[in-house]
Amino acid sequence: MGRLSSLTGAVKGVENDPMPSDYCPSRHRTVRRLTRVVNVGDVAVGGANPIRLQSMTTSDTEDVAATVAQAIRLAEAGCEIIRITAPNKAAASALKDIHRQFRAAGFNQPLVADIHFLPFAAMEAVEHVEKVRVNPGNYADKKKFAVLEYTDAAYAEELERLHEAFTPLVLRAKALGRSLRIGTNHGSLSDRIMNRFGDSPNGMVESALEFIRIAESHGFKDMILSMKSSNPKVMVEAYRLAAARMSELGMDYPLHLGVTEAGEGEDARIKSALGIGSLLADGLGDTIRVSLTEDPWHEIPVCREIVSRAEGFAALGAASAVTLPADPVDPFSFARRETELIELSSKCLAGSGEVPRVIVRSVAGLADWQGAAKEILDAHAAQREVRAEGLLVRLDDPAHAAGLCSLRKALGQAVPALFVETSLSPADFPFDGSGSRLVVVKAFSAGDAASVKAWGEAVTKHDAILAADLDGPMLAALAKDLAAIPAGRLILTSSQPQEGLHATGTIREIVRCAAVAQLEAPLWIRATVANAVRLDPGFQSRLIEASIFAGGLLVDGLRGFPFLRDADLDGQVAHARLRHPARRAHAPDQDRVCRLSELRPHPLRHPVDDPEDQGTHRPPQVRHHRRHGLAS
């Protein structure tokens, strides 16, 4: 009765406790969350160990030769932990020969059994592999899609049954020196969790905590947690909440990061970098997997790209001692930052309620304004689904003023806005002309109050817009003058990080300072050479860099104008697929049929369905109403 009382008491406490406020040491610079070390075979996960790279075989597990061949190819690609699905007793038994043959081939990477639905398959698998992953939503709970309200007594009875079902695996893993992953999936929460906590990140976290409490009651702590969803927004919120709840409860388990069924090509890389990368930037995550519907060994280079950025973030964070007040965003509940509307044209607005607008940099520049016009108009003609709403050029030489006027006229309404970086004064800037709307991009310092005032008056007089390039302390110093600029005339941006902060942290500090100053100007998120963690000309590298930078901001509801690295126009328009994914890029030897972008979910749109990890076998899924568990 004592065990039952402690379990139900924990559940009641979760319902009544206030939402935790802290999930990471800093949201402005990367300070890695300290965890216990969990050994997966000979691979140590967590603590000060490197972020480990994982993948999963896609062959039929009962085809031992094919599965061993895939495991070998993954190991040769640099995969450090290899997961294999075990959907039934026969597949779990096959793990014995797979493990033996893999070791005989000279490889020592640990193997992990992926279990859904069948505790007896888990009991077989734990005999043969170094780790077993269980899904709390379907390990012992069956989805009956029943519309029920559980009383505390009924809930306690369900937990007792769960304790009895999970305990044998815990005890056997403890005896054999195996580790476990408690891997929650957003799309497979149990009826009990759904009806008490809803289809929510909170439900995902509590589902895992139930299993952790059972394992801890037997003195077992060799566990790793995961909180996966096919929606990066849900996934990020769930991991943040898991870290915060564990901190509250004195738990320090490592986290395995991943976005389920991310897909293929650019969309999959964007979704994975958005979710995984933004968490790593916050210091969360000890192992990762990028789930592509491509051959599994193509996941490893993408993992490396993401982890290399995390290592860069960590190096910057270690070299900085900056501490800042918390920004105003609730990291556990998505809400868009309310901003003023900016009219780039009569048919193109930016700000609250609008989709993010995409700005690209011109290669040709104003010295060759005809070339600048041709490059973007040709790009629009070649990729009709992909349109940039703004073109960025630079104007420092007054001799190029005529080129600016000609470019505006040539673009007309094909490109709503022309963003012009300049070192000129308001008196020397060529506001005259017609065509694309002018957005003057001007860098300010803390002592530029008079300049801010002059530019504010100039853009108001000439029906233009000012994009103020600054950081948090500069904004705080210039708050009074920025606030004097009329609504709809101001955009906030930063082209380089504040000292001691990463690029995402710089924007978060700008948002905090703007909130203090009661400024509601929209943001222009710029991934530039100056704020890049790693300079790499490869397209995939740039795509991942920009996705990580934007990811933590977009999931926090900070949106406006995404702008990808200062590079050639073709690269920038391709990067605009953050909003308009139209063409997919695959690994070199992949030949796949592409679906139209209109038929695919946006990386941040709530999915109609939330499938399990690829390679698992499952019954048909029915979506439930977030609160009441009603099928929809």
Image (cartoon, rainbow, N blue to C red):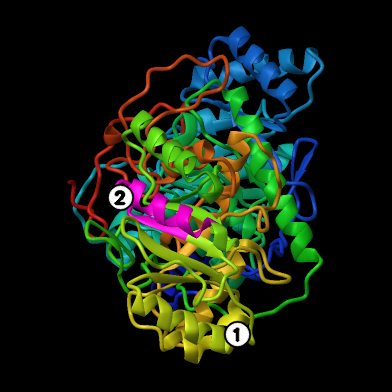
Q: Secondary structure at mark 2?
A: loop
Locate residue 65 relative to residue 47 in the image: left or right.
left
Q: Is residue 344 magenta?
A: no
State which quadrant residue 520 falls in. bottom left
Foreground residue, 242 or 179? Answer: 242
At label 1, which amino acid type do we have? Answer: Asp
Looking at the picture, tell me which residue is in the foreground, 64 or 559: 559
Q: From what the image shows, is residue 2 above or below residue 477?
A: above
* Residue 620 occupies quadrant: top left
Going by the picture, which residue comes out furthest to the bottom?
Answer: 480
Direction from residue 266 to residue 497 in the image, left or right: right
Instruction: Reply above or below: 80 against 497.
Output: above
- Find residue 62 and name its label: none
Residue 236 in view here: yes
Report if residue 356 is visible in the image.
Answer: no
Residue drawn at 79 percent across, 21 percent down: 107
Q: What secondary structure predominates along the stretch shown in magenta?
A: helix
According to the picture, the residue beneath numbered tag 2 turns out to be 412
Q: At 55% from the left edge and 75% from the top edge, which residue is drawn?
A: 425
Name the spot of residue 38 as percent of width and height, x first: 73, 48
Look at the image and give the residue range highlighted in magenta.
Answer: 400-419
> Marks 1 and 2, how far apart in space?
33 Å
Q: Nearer the viewer, residue 75 or 278?
A: 278
